[in-house]
């Protein structure tokens, strides 16, 4: 029986994780839940799963949850808040696996603390890897703790890498759906609305990652994530547009063989893989190969999607540039969703922030967070 700490339990990945727990009650239990601001959902989850501890983003929200739990007659559950609260969840002695699915760098400290506490991590929170990948992977190596990717592309790569040695890998190919604007004429990009950008053709996800998929910044973050998770330079990672999202990614070996991972477009599969690794439990997630008529691949258009180019440039520089890429994007996406900047204002903001970011390689989480704050300040100053 694995007891899980789920960070970001009220989000898309968090809820899919809980549906796996529901399906496999003999394998998984919930030990800790950490959420942000959704008190209603956190209450429902706490009542249903009875974790030892639950955390919300602020003290006020945690107080609300504690009061409502009392009213519902649910006792004996510790309610905590803020970064300390998420860290308490991720390091809970009773938890033996941590699902890191908070969006953004808000999940960084808890993920780092989980690794230092020797807990295996199922990682959905790619922003953590982008901002502090070198620190996280070094800590995981030292503690001999696996970081198992939940991001579907990296999960696919992880699966394809099981058949070959690191020295035999030529290229990691990350597939990209291309998002909703893959075929939109470039001159119409200026008028893209948040509602259009929030409609992803193949995946249902949180708001930031959906906008990042539309701008392809998400794929850029994934390139950096792949470099860190699989210890390869950016030149060994390539992106290929594959609109069907059937092949989740591929690994090309030096002998010319290319291995692909194909499965249903459902995040429960990579989550189950990460939770169960190195086992493969039988699941109901099947893929109808007979209905598959063709697989299409095409190179990405960097003119249409400058965010991808910016991410490759940041990946080459590493350190503060990767931190700034993520931070500037988070600020710019929020501004786009609030209607303050146009869609192409997202890459413009990122490019300007990157241009004013000095090259540096933060060695601690505190230094990473300081560089993140600096980049956000620069981004905010650029926005209306
Ligand atoms: N969804 C996918 O299919 C998918 C695929 C690959 C990777 N990912 C990655 O997985 C992560 C989560 O994505 P998602 O789509 O699940 O996002 P989401 O639906 O927006 O959920 C985000 C979660 O983070 C929580 N959160 C936000 N700020 C917080 C804070 N300050 N403290 C504690 N919790 C906080 C939210 O809580 P409240 O809702 O309670 O505020 C929610 O539980 C992201 O890094 C994303 O890139 C997602």
Image: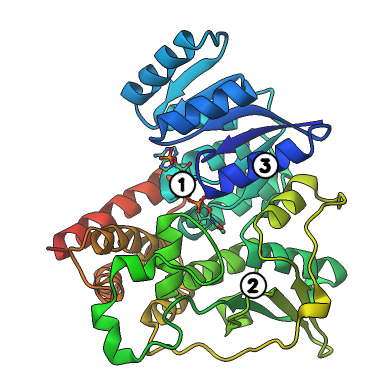
State yes or no: discs 2 and 1 in contact (Cβ < 8 Å): no
N-terminal-most mark, 3 or 1? 3
Instruction: Describe the element under mark 1 as helix, strand or loop.
Output: loop
Please tell me which residue is depicted at 53% across the width and 8% down the height of the picture. 73
Q: Is mark 3 within 8 Å of ligand 1?
A: no
Separation of marks 3 and 1 at Cα, in angstroms: 35 Å
State yes or no: discs 3 and 1 in contact (Cβ < 8 Å): no
Foreground: disc 3 or disc 1: 3
Q: Is residue 255 above or below residue 344?
A: below
Relative horizontal placement of residue 39, taking residue 299 as reference (left or right): left
| Residue picked out by circle 1 | 364
| Residue picked out by circle 2 | 232
Point out residue 351 in the picture as x, y percentages from the top left corner.
29, 75
Relative horizontal placement of residue 122, taking residue 106 as reference (left or right): right
| Residue picked out by circle 3 | 19
Q: Residues within 10 Å of mark 2 (few under 14, many from 20)?
A: some
Quarter holding the C terminus is bottom left
Instruction: Describe the element under mark 2 as helix, strand or loop.
Output: loop
Q: Is residue 40 above or below residue 70?
A: below
Quarter-of-image position of residue 309: bottom left
The residue closer to the viewer here, 166 or 247, is 247
Relative horizontal placement of residue 236, taking residue 65 as reference (left or right): right
What is the image's colouring?
rainbow
Report the residue that reaches farthest toward the left: 384
Quarter-of-image position of residue 183: bottom left
């Amino acid at each position: 029986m694995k007891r899980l700490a789920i960070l970001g339990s009220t989000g898309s990945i968090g809820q899919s994780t809980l549906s796996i727990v529901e399906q496999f009650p003999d394998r998984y239990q919930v030990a800790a839940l950490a959420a942000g601001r959704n008190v209603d959902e956190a209450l429902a989850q706490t009542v249903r799963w009875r974790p030892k501890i639950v955390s919300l983003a602020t003290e006020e929200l945690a107080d609300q949850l504690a009061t409502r739990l009392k009213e519902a007659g649910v006792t004996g559950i510790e309610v905590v808040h803020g970064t300390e609260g998420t860290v308490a969840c991720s390091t809970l002695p009773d938890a033996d696996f941590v699902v890191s699915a908070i969006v953004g760098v808000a999940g960084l400290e808890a993920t780092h603390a989980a690794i230092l506490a020797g807990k295996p991590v199922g990682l959905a929170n790619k922003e953590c890897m982008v901002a502090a990948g070198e620190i996280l992977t070094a800590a995981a190596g030292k503690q001999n703790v696996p970081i198992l990717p939940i991001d579907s592309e990296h999960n696919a790569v992880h699966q394809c890498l099981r058949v070959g040695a690191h020295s035999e890998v030529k290229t990691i190919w990350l597939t990209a759906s291309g998002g909703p604007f893959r075929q939109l004429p470039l001159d119409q990009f200026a008028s893209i609305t948040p509602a259009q950008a929030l409609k992803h053709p193949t995946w249902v996800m949180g708001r930031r990652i959906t906008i990042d998929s539309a701008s392809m910044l998400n794929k850029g973050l994934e390139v950096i994530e792949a470099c860190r998770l699989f210890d390869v330079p950016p030149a060994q990672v390539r992106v290929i547009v594959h609109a069907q999202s059937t092949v989740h990614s591929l690994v090309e070996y030096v002998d010319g063989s290319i291995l692909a991972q194909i499965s249903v477009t459902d995040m429960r599969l990579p989550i189950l893989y990460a939770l169960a690794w190195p086992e493969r439990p039988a699941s109901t997630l099947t893929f109808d190969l007979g209905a598959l008529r063709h697989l299409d691949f095409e190179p990405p258009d960097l003119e249409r999607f400058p965010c991808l180019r910016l991410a490759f440039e940041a990946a080459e520089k590493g350190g503060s540039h990767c931190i700034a890429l993520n931070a500037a994007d988070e600020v710019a996406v929020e501004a786009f969703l609030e209607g303050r900047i146009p869609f192409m204002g997202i890459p413009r903001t990122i490019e300007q922030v990157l241009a004013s970011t000095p090259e540096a390689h933060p060695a601690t989480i505190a230094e990473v967070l300081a560089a993140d704050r600096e980049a956000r300040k620069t981004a905010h100053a650029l926005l209306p």
